[in-house]
Amino acid sequence: GGDNKIGGEGDVVGAEVNADSNKVVVLGVLRCNWGEVAQITGIAVTPVVCYIGDIGDVGNHNVRLRLNPDEVAECFSVPLESFLDREQWIYKEHSAPIFTGGPHIIWGLTGYIIDRFVKDILARYKISLPDGVER
């Protein structure tokens, strides 16, 4: 597998969601406005974008996630194209963006990070999936 560490700071996916680190591919570090992040969390965080493969319990090629109950109450998925639907987002001054288009509302730091990912990556580039990949 690839190097799943950033700047020697440790395992990227180790604390909250334990995935097979040999299958994790670090795609890059998401740039954030540190003033905005500090306003939301009070601490500095570095969002790292990774590809961990297909998630699920079926088959040998799928990644099975093991959630840290001290950090994660539930894990769910949202199709990337859903994040591109601007009508699913709520923006308020002095507040992190809120995404309402999934099985749960996404807000706070997670909402901020996903919004940055949408604006900086998804909305700026044409993304093509291989034939046969569910969109």
Image: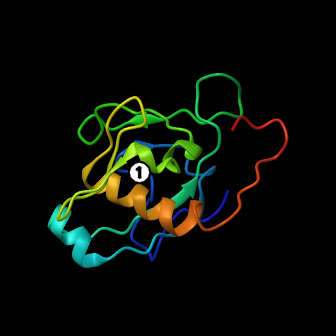
Residue 31 position (above or below residue 52): below
Residue topped by disc 1: 14
In the rendered image, the residue lying farthest to the front is 87
Q: How is the image coloured?
A: rainbow
Q: Whole-percent x and y of residue 132?
A: 82, 35
Please, what is the three-letter code of the amino acid marked with disc 1? Gly
The residue at the point 34 percent across, 31 percent down is 74
Task: From the viewer's perspective, tell me whether residue 106 is left or right of residue 26.
Answer: left
**Image quarter for residue 123?**
bottom right
For residue 48, side relative to residue 45 (left or right): right
Q: Quadrant of residue 47?
A: bottom left
Q: In the current view of this chain or complex, which residue is farthest to the top? A: 58
Relative to 125, residue 19 above or below:
above
- Picture residue at 20% right of the left edge, 59% below the top: 95
Give the camera-side residue of 25 and 101: 101
Q: Quadrant of the N terminus?
A: bottom right
- Residue 84, image x and y in percent? 53, 51
Confirm whether residue 28 shows in the render. Answer: no
Q: Is residue 113 above or below residue 90?
A: below
Secondary-structure class at tag 1: loop
Q: Residue at x 19, y 62 (%)?
A: 40
Residue 100 visible here: yes
Residue 130 falls left or right of residue 85: right
Q: Quadrant of the C terminus?
A: top right
Residue 114 on image: x %, y %: 42, 55
